Image (spheres, grey):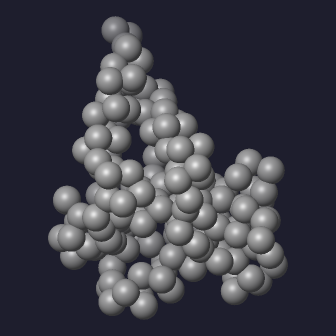
Amino acid sequence: MAAMDLILRPMTQAEFESVIDTAFAAFLAELVASGQMRAEDVSAEARRRRDQNLPNGLDTEHMLLLTAEVAGDRVGWMWLALPGAPGHADTAWIYNIEVDEAKRGKGYGKAMMLAAERELVQRGVTKLGLNVFGSNRTAIGLYERLGYEIISQQMTKPLTAD
């Protein structure tokens, strides 16, 4: 599979509704697992973040929600913020990239990242950022191979009475 075989196209409303709540839930579950959020706060926080970041769903200004396909077959999806989105004055931002579970390990994540970079360059964007959980070693390795550099890092240590 060559990177140029993969295309990113605008997500449909049905696709949006099928993935967005699950994406928020997965992200917030990672925050719970890392001790950054209480499990009982997840439901309210998911609604708050959706209302804040996607107040108009697919039509939210400065947001791109894209489906990745190869030969007409869906392989994943991405959510990008363009410069000008709240908190992203001059940098595009990857809020979510997800390769469908059955399609993982075949190079689609890399192809999606490269396709997104091409799309952003065509739009005149000069910088792209993202966050990644420290436990996601597969993604970290991909981002490093693609030239992303760490600019900030949070660390935590469990404390015991010993």
- Relative to 66, is 17 above or below? above
Give me the residue at 59% from left, 74% from top.
8
Task: Residue 38: give x, y in percent of width and height.
Answer: 35, 19
Name the side, left or right, on which 57 lies relative to 26.
Answer: left
Task: Residue 147: give x, y in percent of width and height.
Answer: 49, 78
Give me the residue at 43% from left, 33% from top.
28
Q: Nearer the viewer, residue 75 or 144?
A: 75
The answer to whether any part of residue 136 appears in the image is no
- Relative to 20, is 143 above or below? below
Task: Residue 13: give x, y in percent of width and height.
Answer: 53, 53
The answer to whether any part of residue 78 appears in the image is yes
Looking at the rendering, in which quadrant would you find the C terminus? top left
Give me the residue at 22% from left, 76% from top.
90
- Relative to 23, is 84 above or below? below
Give me the residue at 59% from left, 43% from top.
18
Q: Nearer the viewer, residue 18 or 141?
A: 18
Name the side, left or right, on which 106 lies relative to 123.
Answer: right
Name the side, left or right, on which 73 lies relative to 120.
Answer: right
Looking at the rendering, in which quadrant would you find the N terminus? bottom right
Task: Residue 61: give x, y in percent of width and height.
Answer: 28, 64
